[in-house]
Image (cartoon, rainbow, N blue to C red):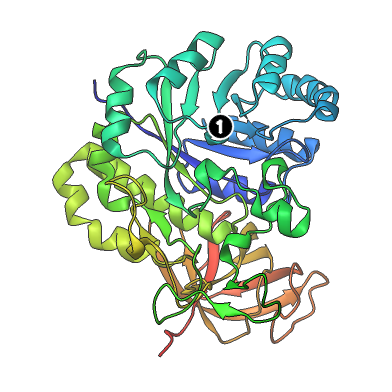
Amino acid sequence: MSRHPELLIPASSLEVLKTAVIFGADAVYIGGEAFGLRAKAKNFSLADMQEGINFAHKHGVKVYVTANILAHNQDLKGVREYFEELREMKPDALIIADPGVFDIAKEVCPKIDRHISTQANNTNYGTYNFWHRQGANRVVSARELSLREIKELRENIPDDLEIETFVHGAMCISYSGRCLLSNYFTGRDANRGACTHPCRWKYAVVEETRPGEYMPVYENERGTYIFNSKDLCMIEYIPELIDAGIDSFKIEGRMKTALYVATVARTYRKAIDDYREDPELYRAHMPWYLKQISNCTYRKFTTGFFFGKPDDDAQIYDSNTYVKEYTYLGIVGNVQNGICRIEQRNKFSVGETIEIMKPDGTDVEVRVRRIMNEEGKAQESAPHPKQGLFVELSVCPEQYDILRRAEPAET
């Protein structure tokens, strides 16, 4: 049976959730202030979470809340109290890795769907069927599965058990994200939400009888970033993902900006919709998808494990930095009499040329005519992050449009 894939987008804050909803998400996943695996993300207060759920539901979009830590004894009482609060907010699902946490959710929130996190090591159809018997509605596949394996998995599980798969974003170098490096080096446990991303650091080797003598780890002549994976991008393989029987296309990035989320959401939204309308239309628009997807911050692209085990081409050896083609300036808030309010994110100035990025896929080049502070006083530039501003542009934007500036290409 042909399945209609859901586009599942991450949100680090209420602002980003609203962006994801407006720019094409079918569902968003968010973390609260506890029990999720992104402790460094801004995350949602309970009040913001309720507002976000209400906003999403008003637009026909689902909200999934991550509670995917691997819990210790002292966590369980708090998990129960947290789920009692979530029950009243009515998110559409809870994303869980730990069987103990799963049992609490089953008891406390029986009417909320339960999804099994990739952290639970979901690599075979036996595991999927196990979780289905426990009452799970969906299982998130391990990133290490190929499309062939996912297709075989689909053939051996019930039709009503959904498969969710990461199709875009950062790749973890540790098996299904279960990493000990962060805890070992910094005391911050990746499995309890505090990863410091040591896989992106530069390493050398020290022989135990020669302390202080650092030998570089040369995989080749370009450098020593031995764990530095390229980012996953499957925008060119929507037909293959659908054919494998995947129900939800998951975008990684609960630490990302609204610009990143808007760019990825609207590009995958258009690709999925184009393919469903006409495969030829999808193929014809491929240059546009690829150009758009390279507009947001990324670390070069790979297809991960989907077509077999990655080789050394999936690594970046010469740098651990991101490619950045646009700078995020802010989201358009209220618009009155041609003046829009924004909370500024990066500096821009009067007279500058910037872009309005719209949910329908269009980008409008505009000039900044005026910048005023909240007291109405004119200023030549906006140098202070998070400052509330009123801006007049040569073309009036709409609420929730994104403002961005193209950066010159590096030579």
Locate residue 35 relative to residue 180 in the image: left or right: right
Q: Which of these two is toward me, 108 or 290? A: 108
Q: From the top left corner, tell me how far across and down residue 199 is, in percent.
A: 57, 61
- 230 shown above or below 245: below
Q: Is residue 41 visible?
A: no
Q: From the top left corner, tell me how far across and down residue 103 is, in percent.
A: 68, 14
Residue 111 placement: quadrant? top right
The residue that mark 1 highlights is 117
Task: Inspect the image, locate mark 1, and give the three-letter code of the amino acid beneath it.
Answer: Ser
- 376 shown above or below 68: below
Q: Which of these two is toward me, 329 or 114? A: 114
Q: Residue at 62% of width from left, 80% of height from top? A: 214
Q: Residue furthest front?
A: 209
Q: Residue furthest left?
A: 280
Locate residue 196 relative to residue 145 in the image: left or right: right
Locate residue 400 relative to residue 187 in the image: left or right: left
Q: From the top left corner, tell me how far across and down residue 350 is, in percent.
A: 62, 85
Image quarter of the N terminus: top left
Q: From the top left corner, tell me how far across and down residue 104 is, in percent.
A: 72, 16
Label 1 element class:
loop
How many labels were placed on the picture? 1
Q: Residue at 59% of width from left, 32% of height from top? A: 63
Q: Residue at 59% of width from left, 24% of height from top? A: 92
Image quarter of the C terminus: bottom left
Q: Is residue 319 visible?
A: yes
10 Å crowding of disc 1: few (<14), some (14-19), many (20+): many
Locate residue 130 relative to residue 12 in the image: left or right: left
- 196 shown above or below 102: below
Q: Which of these two is toward me, 132 or 121? A: 121
Residue 240 placement: quadrant? top left
